[in-house]
Amino acid sequence: MKKFEWIEHPADAGFRAYGSDLEEAFENAALALAEIIGKTDNVETKEEISIEIESEDLEALLFDWLDHFVYMFGAKDFIASEFEVEEISKEKEGYKLIAKAKGEEYNSEKHGPGTEVKAITYHMMDIIRQTDHCSVQVIVDV
């Protein structure tokens, strides 16, 4: 199964990410986002960050998960290439995600010029859960 594919959008960048379960689809969505930002095949896993996010529904959880990496890149010049979503769980007030990401400080010479991601959007966002696989679709403002 492919990890993700690009989807056409007239003004922004879009992708559909796949996984055998929701956690893997979220991991591959983060990888697709990182590919927009820079070349992930050159990213070394020098630093590991732990992530815990709580959101009111799955769409908000996906939004917040990806937005975390937009923030980490913009505020800390951190780009990740490995993502491990340990758990997505239903809570009383919504959903919770526990994950780790590995990467390093962004370097344009090493990781390429990339594309500036201004924001994650809810436009055309979709989460499809089936018994043997999941997919998520996201459009990002570039």
Image (tube, helix red, strand yellow):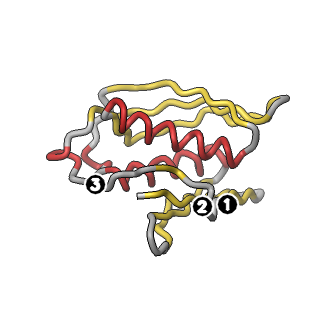
Q: Secondary structure at mark 1?
A: strand
* Coordinates of residue 67 in the picture (x, y in percent): 51, 42
Question: Residue lying furthest right in this view?
Answer: 92
Residue shown at 44% from the left, 36% from the top: 71
Residue shown at 41% from the left, 34% from the top: 72
Q: Secondary structure at mark 2?
A: strand
* Coordinates of residue 122 in the picture (x, y in percent): 62, 55
Distance, label 3 to label 1, CA atoms, is 25 Å
Which quadrant of the structure image shows residue 103?
top left
Mark 3: few/some/many CA within 10 Å (<14, 14-19, 20+): few
Q: Secondary structure at mark 3?
A: loop
Mark 2: few/some/many CA within 10 Å (<14, 14-19, 20+): many
The residue identified by callout 3 is: 114
Q: Please state which amino acid type lies under the numbered disc 3.
A: Gly
* Coordinates of residue 34 in the picture (x, y in percent): 39, 48
Instruction: Return the disc, 1 or 2, that comes first in the chain's sequence.
Output: 1
The numbered disc on residue 126 is 1
Instruction: Return the disc, 2 or 3, that comes first in the chain's sequence.
Output: 3
The residue identified by callout 2 is: 137
Q: Are marks 1 and 2 in contact (CB under 8 Å)?
A: yes
Mark 1: few/some/many CA within 10 Å (<14, 14-19, 20+): some
**Can you say which quadrant of the picture contains the N terminus?**
bottom right
Residue 95 lies, with reference to residue 15, above or below; the image says above
The numbered disc on residue 43 is none
Which quadrant of the structure image shows residue 142?
bottom left
Q: Please state which amino acid type lies under the numbered disc 2.
A: Gln
